Image (cartoon, helix red, strand yellow):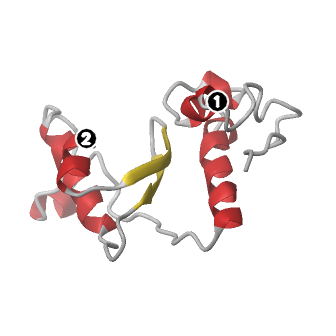
Amino acid sequence: MAAVKHAHPYTLLAMVVLPEHRHTIWRLPAGDANFALRWSLIKAGFSRQLPKNEVIGASRQSKRERGIWQRRYWEHQIRDETDLARHIEYIHFNPVKHGWVKQPTDWLHSTLHGYIKRGIVEPDWGRVGGAIEGKHRD
């Protein structure tokens, strides 16, 4: 991600990496909406570092694809600050939603820890009753 960010700048606003998927929010430079190029380069760079020992179906073989990435991804253009806050909360709570941990802070591979360190959210964010109870501060 650092190499791609250096060549094709973006600001990472939020991210969580789970065993079977990841969520990311980027802010791209003005006039640049080419997130597809960035994802393609990140996936390719990551894939080249792994041994080619995954099971690959005929369809992927014919397209010279690895078996570690899903083909599609979902994109959403953030509309306003409320939409941004809602998506950041969704990302940070995602490990709980998928049953990997009981509390968002228990998941190490999340930008939530940086938000806590910078005082953007409380250290106990998301801990009440198994639902998103904490809110990001403005």
Please give left or right for residue 81 compared with residue 43 in the image.
right
Q: Nearer the viewer, residue 78 or 70?
A: 78
Say if 66 sits above or below 129 in the image.
below
Q: Residues within 10 Å of mark 2 (few under 14, many from 20)?
A: few
Image x and y of residue 63, in percent: 13, 64
Q: Quadrant of residue 21?
A: top left
Q: Amino acid at mark 2?
A: Ala
Tell me the element at label 2: helix
Amino acid type of the residue tagged 1 in the rendering = Ile
Residue at 37% over, 63% down: 28
Q: Residue at x 63, y 22 (%)?
A: 106
Residue furthest bottom as drawn: 31
Q: Residue at x 63, y 57 (%)?
A: 87
Task: Give the residue number, with chain letter if any, for mark 2.
Answer: 2
What is the number of callouts on the image? Answer: 2
Q: In the figure, 49 relative to 67: above or below?
A: above
User: Who comes first in sequence, dot 2 or dot 1?
Assistant: 2
Position of the N terminus by quadrant: top left
Residue 109 spot, x, y in % from top left: 49, 30
User: Alpha-carbon neighbours of circle 1 within 10 Å: few (<14), some, or many (≥20)?
Assistant: some
Residue 50 picture quarter: top left
* Horizontal relation, residue 132 to residue 43: left or right: right
The residue sitting at the right extreme is 129
Residue 74 on image: x %, y %: 47, 66
The answer to which of 58 and 123 lies nearer the viewer is 123
Q: Is residue 37 left or right of residue 26?
A: left
CA separation in Å, label 2 and label 1 = 22 Å
Please, is residue 65 above or below residue 55 in the view? below
Say which residue label 1 marks. Answer: 116
Helix, strand, or loop for circle 1?
helix
